[in-house]
Amino acid sequence: MSNTRGKETGILLVAQVICIALFGLFVDYDASLAPNANSTQHAAELELSNNLYPLFQDVHVMMLIGFGFLMTFLKRHGFGSVGFNFLLTAYVIEWSTLVNGWFALIGSGSKIFLTTRSLLEADFAVATVLISFGAVLGVSSPVQLTIMATLEVVFYNINIYVGVVKLGALDVGGSIFIHLFGAYFGLAVARVLYKKGQTDHEKEGSVYHSDIFAMIGTLFLWLYWPSFNAGPVEGADRHRAIINTVLSLAACTVTTFAISTATDKNGKLDMVHVQNATLAGGVAMGASADLVVHPFGALLIGTAAGILSTLGYRYLQPLLQRTIKLHDTCGVHNLHGMPGILGAVASGITWAILNTSHNGRSGATQGGYQIAAMTVGLALALAGGTLTGFLLKLPVWDNLTTDELYDDDVFWECQEDESLTQYTLTQCQDTIEDKDVETPADGSEAAAK
């Protein structure tokens, strides 16, 4: 039986004390937020913050309700899905504010000044970590998740520094730097942590009500994804990002429903596809969201994402589990990884077609740098995730046993008695079956019973 109580308490409290100290040394409000700020001088910055806050809150809802409830499909891991999602969100907001700020200070300055945009950028780091969390959902302890988040935020910033600062790639909605990176980082960790008996585990499946809860997460993510893709830009770029994302999501959803039924032998819908693949259009649209892809282009990207993601869930994920022992609890490869690659390629093609110069580069050249950033991000994610996975696998972190996988009871006070619940459900089923017995023609109650 894993016992990480003391370790988790120690790690969280030490991390919190360190964050308090580092915030005291390095972090302050932006000059525009100071009590004695010149209202005329800083009016523009304040206006930007006022306009950005609603979008930030939309993204915040995505992190807590969207990602949190999307992961509640596991029948015995609802507390862990929402609860550990909450913990990681709070912790990464603090830690990424520091790390994001330090990387932004490279070459200039010594103090991190916060605005509303800083909070939005922290949420983007949160999204990256939560995507990785999905790959190891139910198979990792809170201690391991905290350590993974700590390291991943550093690798995430290294990737952005190389891809954005050095290569000059543009990715307004995070197809490359958030979705692709988070997915493959998490997949690398998941592969290292894989243990025999993890696949087809009796507790890994869903039940009717857990799938309904997961759909709550899907709908919140679907609703607010335009804000996620549009938040970093302003003006006409923001409006294009909103329009393109809505169209891409709509096309992706219609396509997912079509492909899900087409690939089922009985022509039925798979709830896993509806919960996840319907969102792939938002992922794939990210890197091109603010570009002039035209409405038909947004529909095309969303349609391609729906096909790719649904087929990934149907065929590729089981294949990877069988062949290379890659267990992906939430299917982040299908929702974030492959659509992230699609988004990077789509942005490269879009830049080449538009042939609009950017920072002295031709459109075709910029398109090439988009693909280069994707390649570097993939390599960094796999390398960083593999190193992190081996660290998390050390015996000191009390790895979960096979019996403890996908079970809230290991880390949470669970009031519900599963055996009693199962007994009650059995009795209800028996009652329903009794009611369904047809009454004989003579109306005999005894015969009906």
Image: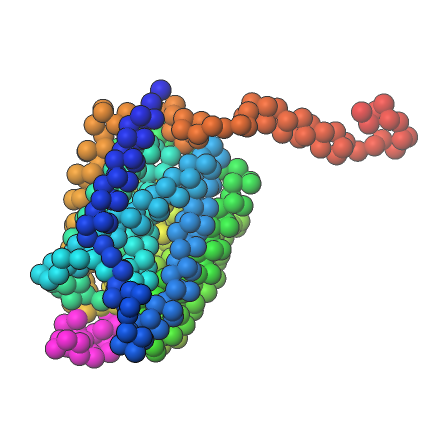
> Is 368 left, or right, of 281 in this rendering?
left
> Is 261 left, or right, of 99 in this rendering?
right
**Residue occupying image coordinates x 19% and y 65%:** 169
Q: Position of residue 372 (x, y in %)?
A: 15, 61
Which quarter of the image is occupied by the C terminus?
A: top right
Nearer to us in this view, 66 or 55:
55
Q: Does the magenta stretch include residue 334?
A: no
- Is residue 427 among the parts visible in the rendering? yes
Q: How many marks?
A: 0
**Residue occupying image coordinates x 47% and y 61%:** 223
Residue that extends furthest to the front in the rendered view of this protein: 36
Answer with the quarter of the image where residue 60 lies.
bottom left
Answer with the quarter of the image where residue 421 lies.
top right
Q: Where is residue 132 in the image (x, y as percent from the top left)?
A: 30, 45
Nearer to us in this view, 239 or 333:
239
Residue that extends furthest to the top in the rendered view of this protein: 1
Residue that extends furthest to the right in the rendered view of this protein: 442
Give above or below for 11 relative to 263.
Answer: above
Q: How is the image coloured?
A: rainbow
Nearer to us in this view, 130 or 366:
130
Answer with the quarter of the image where residue 31 lies.
bottom left
**Residue occupying image coordinates x 27% and y 60%:** 29
The range drawn in magenta is 349-366
> Is 49 left, or right, of 222 in this rendering?
left
**Residue occupying image coordinates x 41% and y 59%:** 57
Q: Where is residue 180 in the image (x, y as percent from the top left)?
A: 27, 54
- Is residue 44 among the parts visible in the rendering? no
Q: Is residue 357 magenta?
A: yes
Q: Where is residue 311 in the image (x, y as percent from the top left)?
A: 38, 51
Give above or below for 10 relative to 167.
Answer: above
Which quarter of the image is occupied by the N terminus?
A: top left
